[in-house]
Amino acid sequence: MAERGGRGGGRNSGGVSGSLDKSITLPPDEIFRNLENAKRFAIDIGGSLAKLAYYSTVQHKVARVRSFDQSGKDVEHESPYEITVQEEITARLHFIKFENAYIETCLDFIKDHLVNTETKVIKATGGGAYKFKDLIEKKLGLKLDKEDVMTCLIKGCNFVLKNIPHEAFAYMKDADPEFRFQMNHPHIFPYLLVNIGSGVSIVKVETEDKFEWIGGSSIGGGTFWGLGALLTQTKKFDELLQLASKGRHTNVDMLVKDVYGGAYQTLGLSGNLIASSFGKSATADKEFSKEDMAKSLLHMISNDIGQLACLYAKLHNLNKIYFGGFFIRGHPVTMRTITYSINFFSKGEVQALFLRHEGYLGAIGAFLKGAEQDNPNQYSWGENYAGSSGLMSTSPDICPMQRERSGTFDMLEMDRLERPLVNLPLLEDPSTYIPDTVDLTDDAMARKYWLSCFEEALDGVAKRAAASQPESVDAAERAEKFRQKYWDKLQTLRQQPFAYGTLTVRSLLDTREHCLNEFNFPDPYSKVKQKENGIALKCYQSVIDSLDSLGWEERQFALVKGLLAGNVFDWGAKAVSDVLETEPQFGFEEAKEKLQERPWLEDSYNEWLARLKASPHKCALIFADNSGIDIILGVFPFVRELLSRGTEVILACNSGPALNDVTYSESLLVTERIAATDPVIRAALKEEKLLLVQTGSSSPCLDLSRLDKGLANLVRERKTDLVIIEGMGRAIHTNYYAALKCESLKLAVIKNSWLADRLGGKIFSVIFKYEVPLK
């Protein structure tokens, strides 16, 4: 049994090359980052690779806003609030993977930089933990505490599946690229974990702490390595896989067509299936190449493992199998043959899945075992793209230097989020929800455009970052470091768009925000937002007076037009930022003139108006977009109208800054100022009919599967029956196709010519999408 043809080639176990000797290409302090603040350690040592885990506290700058009133100053100010930059400490998990050959040098470096470790114990797992026990204890002065390998693997697997949305992927050999990432199902259990080390262990995982070993095999990675060494005299595992990638198994294996002259129609067997592994070697009077023998051996063992895993999955009624272990290690030839085997034996009913970070599972699990008193599972964690290496290409044609395993270091960083993240309860089906509208991994034309778009904007972002901190003597230097780091990330993504999972506009924006934070630019637009909020607040009452003077139906259209006009003020869109920088008089009325006339590109306004003539909604959840004119002159008049109809409103804003998006803390101060002059808003706040909440996000886009738990609870408590999502990032780049259990309104102005053309419109075209769920 085998598939035909296909590409081969090894892949780097990480993305950062270099060693700790004279040939180093990356400084050790960029590998073992923030080591001076490390608190707790764990290590997983395999036969050839060591994976170190440590927890550290990271100090970085954050922009805080506060009312002038609270600081005891004069209340007469041009600005509605003041901005202070403070130091904040957050928790970060670091995971580093390197060859065992470097372990002593790495331990020396760690020892020299340890300052504040809270523990005298290092948790360890893996077969090599015994071998290096004395060395580790001597070098670090920490007692080594051994943990069960399988328990650590499962804890690590659960952790990455819950916290990294694009952790799991299917491998498709004929696709470009080969990876097809899976959005994590909110309920990850049960699943089958097949760990292929020297042998094979098959474990059924039912809950966080409940799992059982249900089977296995002595025929695994060690079998491939041992027999391969005997057949080819090649002693290194990766060299065996390289040989296999170049071989043709059909020169060695006997196929169905070799036995029957073609397909075996009675049993429905293709003529290209393997009838007998190494079958031709018994009768052929010739020498076989090392490459062909290695390929035949790989197929034989992979097919055996695949069939065994498939049978256990069917026996236990499971349709997801996660594969891990040193036999996998991201090699295309192993992933390809196992995927084919699972598809063949299950007739497509069982899915073979692999993990971006499968090499870290043991280290993550060992760390979690050592940190149980801190209960790390009560938090949500997010991958820090700025400090993580990313998945490397399996293609032999891409970045050959990056595929060299010798002397490589691979890194993963996870930041602890303030509060747990959960699904929006109103998602129609959380298991099928995909936030992003366009998959740039698949869409080569869109990928090329958006990567170029972000590259062209980079100098301007770096310039604004430096300008946002005029009092800092090193702002320009840090801005240049940011520019270089993000540029390098973009070049990596050009070659390997799957490096951090599915590539999307959202992930490009998030990576940029992570890189800005890395170099202490927490909110480059803070002063822009402060100024625009001040200007908009002065206009608020006149906008309300104008709206109140209109008849009901005319007012409804004016409110929608105001929402759309406010959404024009997006500093993340180059077409808008160019106007805002060159035309300071450009304001609310000018923005209205820019809008497309009806009928809009997507136009459900008539249906929305008809719905407003019926009974009011019980509670509306509004995801706000930009600061300034958008939230103050667009969103708040709309909120005010809903409140006047008897609808409660939950106004959700970003927890942290991104571009000129309004943050939760800014929304509190803006609302306070509006309430001081608007009795409708003031009464709604007092009666808790207007509630301000944070989303749990610091992104210009919106992932409805990762929202603040407090927001989700409030949505349930208030029986929310209307969701309003505004803005290009939240309603077009993400959630354009999101299906909800309740009514929804998605509206945005398209401020990008390429995107407008893609959607069949022009720049400043309007999306007004009112949707009612099917009964």
Image (cartoon, rainbow, N blue to C red):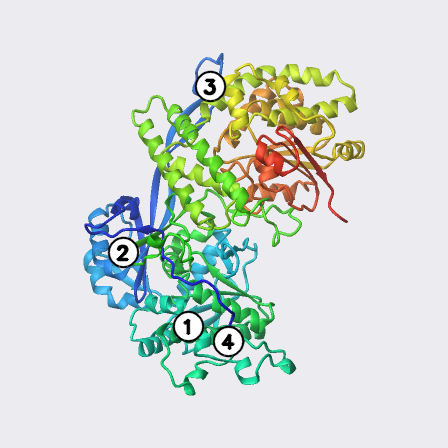
State the residue position of label 3: 68
Marked residue nearer the N-terminal end (1 or 4) = 1
Marked residue nearer the N-terminal end (4 or 2) = 4
Res. 591 in view = yes
The residue that appears at 71% across and 19% down in the rendered structure is 547
Q: Are marks 3 and 2 in contact (CB under 8 Å)?
A: no
Marks 3 and 1 sit apart, C-alpha to C-alpha, by 72 Å
State the residue position of label 4: 308
State the residue position of label 1: 295
Q: Position of residue 701 (x, y in %)?
A: 54, 38
Marked residue nearer the N-terminal end (3 or 2) = 3
The residue that appears at 52% across and 63% down in the rendered structure is 207
Q: Given this view, does label 3 or label 1 mark the residue nearer the observer?
A: 1
Amino acid residing under circle 4: Leu
Q: Foreground residue, 504 or 616? A: 504
* Residue 407 numbered mark, or none: 2
Q: Given this view, does label 3 or label 4 mark the residue nearer the observer?
A: 4
Above or below 463: residue 376: below
